[in-house]
Amino acid sequence: MAITIQHHLKGSIIGGLIAMVLAVPFIGLYTVSTDQGLVVQTRWSWVVWSGVMVLVGSLAVALLRDVLSARRAGRPNRAAGTKPKRDDALTAKLSKGFAIGITLFAITLPFMPFSDRYIMDVGTTVLIFVLLGMGLNVTVGLAGLLDLGFVAFYAIGAYSFAILSTTLGWGFWVCLPLSGLIAALFGALLSMPILRLRGDYLAIVTLGFGEITRIIILNWQSFTGGPAGISGIPRPSLFGLSFDRRPPEGLTSFHEVTGISFATEHRLMFLYLIALSLVLAAAWVIKRLRALPIGRAWEALREDEIACRSLGINPVASKVSAYAVGGMLGGFAGCFFAARQGFVSPESFTFMESALILAIVVLGGLGSQIGVVIAALFIVLLPEVGREFADFRMIVFGIAMIAIMVWRPGGLLSQRIPTIRLSSIKGEAA
Amino acid sequence: MNAPLLSVTGLTMRFGGLVAVDGVNLTAETNRITALIGPNGAGKTTIFNCLTGFYKPTSGELTLNRPGQLPVSLQTLPGYQVSRHGVVRTFQNIRLFPRMTVLENLLVAQHVGLMKKAAFGVAGLIGLKGWRTAEKEAIDRARFWIERLDLTSVADEEAGNLSYGVQRRVEIARAMNTNPLLLCLDEPAAGLNPKETGVLGELLQGIREQFGIGILLIEHDMGLVMGISDRIHVVEYGRKIAEGTPEQIRSDERVIKAYLGEPDEEELPAIVAEDVAGQEGGRA
Amino acid sequence: MDASALGTFLQYLINGLALGAIYGLIAIGYTMVYGIIRMINFAHGEIYMIGAFVAVTTFSILAAAGVTSVPLALLLVLVMAIAFTAAYGWTVERVAYRPLRGAPKLAPLISAIGMSILLQNYVMQTQGARPKPLAPVMNGGVTLWQGDGFAVNVSYIQLFIILLTVALMVGFTQLINRTALGRAQRACEQDRTMAGLLGINVDRTISLTFVMGAALAAVAGVLVTMYYGVIDFYIGFLAGMKAFTAAVLGGIGSLPGAMLGGLLIGLIEAFFTGYVSGAYKDVASFSVLILVLVFRPTGLMGRPDIEKV
């Protein structure tokens, strides 16, 4: 034991020293713009502190890992050297329980006494990311096709609604399916030239599609409003009732009809509930699709494309449909996003968004819908919780992403739940 | 006599300057087990790849004669369409969907029919009756093959976690779930022990008898080949050097030469025995 | 084509080559790392950004210290930038990628994205979010061709960029082809397990690959700082994306391919900006990439990827 501590201590000291070296040009030295050009200033004590912090941190992590692995070794099944038999029936039950629990929580949340505007707002953001994550999960998680430009579908959905509503005056409920369809169409188009590409080549090409979309939106002034974006997008209505204080022409407002006094909270609640229904609908559809031939073909494609071909599955059709369905969900999310903000601009659709959505899918565990929910909560809430540290929250966020991957490379929920079980079908001899 | 189920004439496959298959003719018939043998690198798997749509042959005619239907030229089909016409294959180095269960693997094999019944997802999504019946039939068919190949205990396991021998059986079951006319097996006995090989032989004969389909087999295990084949084709350096019943092949001079390099007093059956013994020894 | 049009063309060509050389230097880092561990090092653009910041700081220190000799200053800046950036490259691999050897394919990619976020915000917090302007280090240039109402100029800095890149490429190719380190690296590329069994220290070879890639990115960072005279914490993203595009265009895993891809992207940008529109230059680069990949799915100089059945 003493030897391992000594070993860890040595490693941590080396780590601390390296950190100090790395800290010199960025923490120790910094440049300030003055009239005479850049002037270098120093803060050497910070360098020492970063060394100490890394030393203590890495020592703590090393010791913690020792303790954890010792505990794991203490468990009987591990000690015997046998692979613990994973009970996937239990996992399935647990995730079903969790799914029901989180759904109930999400439905009742707006009606809780503690729920306020802030909670509704953050909750809606979480739901948008859940929807985006579910969409990308179809492409990446189920069909195994990498997509680093998923934000394109989000943008296309948002701009479809923005343009249709501001030019033709169409409402949210008409544009929602249209936005999804337009995004799905782009998904299918996008998949055409890249059918022959594999793995890492897909990464850059899809990233390119995302960037091309953003650049076109940014520069096509007359159509998209360019960098200024499009404003004055109508908010969703409830059976013709508006949630605005002064409803647009032709609509009556919710507070007038119901007699409830006007409150912005109602609109936020309403938006939250729309987002929630979209998410629940998407979750249900994807769950069904997984057990249908189209969904099974996606997963089979992820597992082995050659075997798929030998069984008569058309890989082209599977890939196109996976991009289209994923894109469609992205389009729905975009349409909703535009309706919620009342305003869209290219800034909301950068590569960073694509990266975060992909992170949600991978952190959650490829293919797992519950995983998407947990990871979306994490990705949205961590920076929110960290608002006090404002400046450092993105640094912590980056570290957390690395740490989770190192800790669980397969994602939080890496176990696949089968779509069907022979043992649970009533026996009927063929 | 009717045209054979599959007739291959003048099949040639070139890769750049290399002629992997050179003018091979062969036939496979319904209700018969046909074997394709030859030394390593003789071009057997290349023939399979041409047959099942993975390679476009340089030249040659691959005709599938389905009972009561027009003949199909397999080489003109897009690769994934071949199995839709009734020719399905397994792979030398097993290609299952490792993270899906055995049952799911077998259901994927019924994709084409189910996709139509599900109206490309729409009927399935809302759970129409037509779809539910089709799904039940598909599960029943999968269940039938699971029971037939003794896979009941592993039906809900991920295919990738199963042992090699079991995976081979799953792959055959999966191929049979496409309802084929011709089942092409690429070294199904590789990696199996003699007992498993024996069971495999019985299984293949059983399938042939019960379903009357044609089986085309690449195999190195001479015991198995000689035991179950109705007809054997021998290839060497991309050319066919002999064809006949097991008895004829056993005594064919060219075949013995191909396997031994030069004539020898030893008979092929002796080599066969050695082959089996060698495999056993290798595993012990 | 009249003289003026030809002159304009030549000027774009020179601008494109200088820009392309920088992209090429960054692209080599992507391609080498991909070659050896089959992962896209998304944080590589940030490594280049780190190089640029070290360059700015060092230039400022030298200016304060009263160093006036340009060659001496350049040498010192290059040495400092390479040393610190290489240290960052090494650490990034050690912390974020080494624990993920053998993990599912997407895990290192996400870890790299996390690293990219971390480094960007780290630099933003420590150095400030505002752009850093730098007084020009190298002024002037040569007029190659003076015609009627047009001139073809090559600035000293452009010349320096192209010459240094050529020198580095030659030296680097020798390093990979001739030395034991290069052999070890190529062996690891082909079969890491076997290389390990033959006594090659695989971890060390991979670390050195990151160090080499970071060193070249540092040079690119120094050159960009001098070329544009202004940098900020966000430059890594765009440059990284373009260099990545260049690496894939050339055929990821191939060193000459990365250089060729870099030059092509530089030229496409320069010509497209000159003749069509600056706003859509990135659309042009990506479109060329997609077009090339449709016909050559593994890039211009990548080995064809044969599907084994």
Image (tube, rainbow, N blue to C red):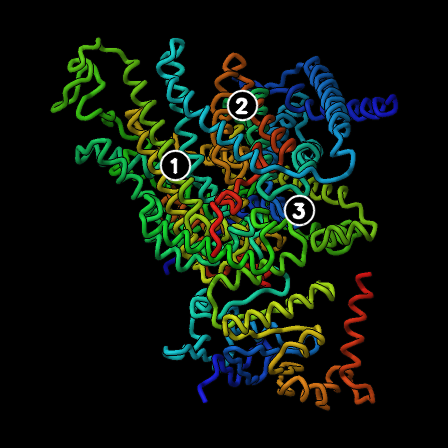
- Say which amino acid is labelled 1: Trp
Instruction: Indicate which disc residue C37 carries.
Output: 3
Report x, y in % for residue A111: 35, 14
**What residue is shown at x 61% (from left), y 78% (from top)?**
B35
- Check the picture and name the quadrant holding the C terminus of chain C: bottom right
Mark 3 → mark 2, Cα distance in angstroms: 28 Å
| Kind of residue sitting beneath label 3 | Ile
Residue shown at the point (23%, 18%) measured from the top left = A243
Instruction: Describe residue A365's horizontal placement relative to residue A130 as left or right.
Output: right
Examine the rendered structure and indicate whether residue B4 appears above or below residue C186. Answer: below
Identify the secondary structure beneath mark 2: helix
- Quarter of the rendering containing residue C158: top right
In the displayed structure, would residue B237 be above or below residue C93? below
Q: Mark 1 points at which residue?
A: A284
Q: Separation of disc 1 and disc 2 at Cα?
A: 33 Å
* Closer to us: B70 or C9: B70
Position of residue B221 measured from the top left corner of the image (x, y, whole percent): 71, 73
Residue at 35 percent across and 34 percent down: it is A281
Depth check, mark 1 against mark 2: the one in front is: 1
